[in-house]
Amino acid sequence: MRVDLFDFDLPEAHIALRPACPRDASRLLEVTPGQPLADRMFADLADRLRPGDVLVLNDTKVLPAALYGLRPARQHGGGGPVRVEINLHKRLDGARWRAFVRPAKRLHDGDVLTFGDNNNACMAGALNAIVRDKAEGEITLEFELSGAHLDEAIARVGQMPLPPYIARKRAVDARDVHDYQTIFAQQSGSVAAPTASLHFSDAMFAALDARGVERQSLTLHVGAGTFLPVKTDDTTSHKMHGELYQVSEQTAAALNAARAQGRRIIAAGTTALRTLESITDENGVVHAGAGDTDIFITPGYKFRAVDGLLTNFHLPRSTLFMLVCALAGLDEMRAAYAHAIAHDYRFYSYGDASLLWRE
C-alpha cells in the first residue's frame, strides 16, 4: 500500500512530554467500527470490558539503553576523541547488542568505546565495548562484560531511552525512571516501553479483577526499530527489525481455552498484539515458545488472535498507525485520529489511550 495513505497533520503540541498523573488519569477514545466515537477516561476501561474477557499484557522491562560514550583518539590514522550517542535496540547474545549510533561516520570496525560518568576512559567502573559490523547508522557492540554483569553495568551508566520526539524537547530525568516503566515489568530486555500499559495502576487492576476480566502475560522485548519512520513510498519495501518474544505454556493454554469458550482476547499494546499474531496459527491456535518476530501488519491482514486492542496514539506514517488501521479500518482510524487532534488528545508514548475493536 502507498505510505502516504497513512499520513496526517499532527501538531507537535499534541505530543505529550510527560504522562498523566496518576497513571490512569489519561483519556480513552473508544473506536468501534460502524458506531460513533466515544470519548472516555482510562479509568472507565473495566466498564468497557466484559466478564470473561482476557487482557494480554507484555511484562517486559525497559533497560536504560541510551548510552553516551567516548571513542578515544586513535593512535594511528588521525582522529581525535569523539563523543558518541548509542541506542541499543536488540540483544544478540550475552555480550553483544545491535545499536543505532551517532555520529556513525566517525566510527570504524574495531574502535573501542567507553561509557561511564564524564566518559572518562580511566575511571574505574567504566564500561567498554568494541565496534563490530558497522552498516548504515547501525553497529554491533561487543561488550567486555556479559549476562547479568552487563545488564548491571548498562543500568549504571545508561539512561532511559525516551523516544526522540520527547528526548529532543527535554532531558531525561529521574521521573522517567518510574514513568517509562510499567508497574508490572518483570523480564528485563526492552529498549522502549510497551506504552499502552503505562496507564495501568493497582487501582485499575483491582477494578478489572472485580469485573471478572482475566489477565495473562507474555514477553516481547521491544526494539527501537518498531518506532522507526517508514521511509519508503510503499509498505512492501519497508523492513521491520526483529524482536524477541517468549510465551509460556500456561499463557497459551489459557488463551486457547478462552477462544474455545467464545471469550474475547484484548491485547494491551501493539507489542502484545504483534506477539499474539506471530504465535497463533491459521486455525486460531496459540502456540507457546520463544523466537524472533518481524511481523509487519498493514490493512488487508487477517487477524487470528485478537478481538480488540488497547493502544496509545501513534505518529503519521508509522508502522503502528498502519497496524491500528489494519485492525479497525483505514477510514475509521483516520476519522478517529482527526477527532483526537480536534479534541486535544495527547499523542505518543506518554499520551492518551484508545480502545479499538476489530473491524
Image (tube, helix red, strand yellow):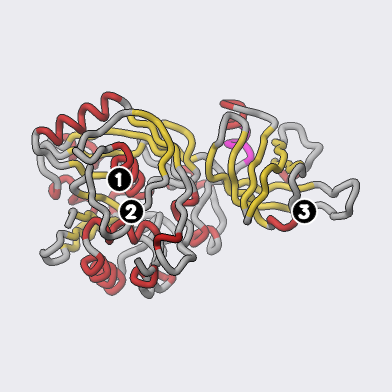
Dot placed on the residue nearer the N-terminal end, 3 or 2:
3
Residue 112, compared with residue 227, is above or below; it is above
Q: Tell me the residue that label 2 is attached to.
A: 297
Could you tell me residue 156's position as x and y percent?
61, 36
Residue drawn 24% across the image and 56% down it? 327
- Residue 155 counted in the magenta span: yes
Q: Nearer the viewer, mark 3 or mark 2?
A: 2
Residue drawn 48% across the image and 36% down it? 189
Magenta-highlighted residues: 153-157
Disc 2 marks a residue whose amino acid type is Ile
Q: Tell me the residue that label 1 is attached to.
A: 273
Q: Tell me the residue that label 3 is attached to.
A: 82
User: Closer to the camera, 269 or 137?
Assistant: 137
Label 1 sits on a secondary structure element that is: helix
Quote the CA–CA distance across marks 3 and 1: 40 Å
Residue 56, compared with residue 81, is above or below; it is above
Q: Residues within 10 Å of mark 1 (few under 14, many from 20)?
A: many
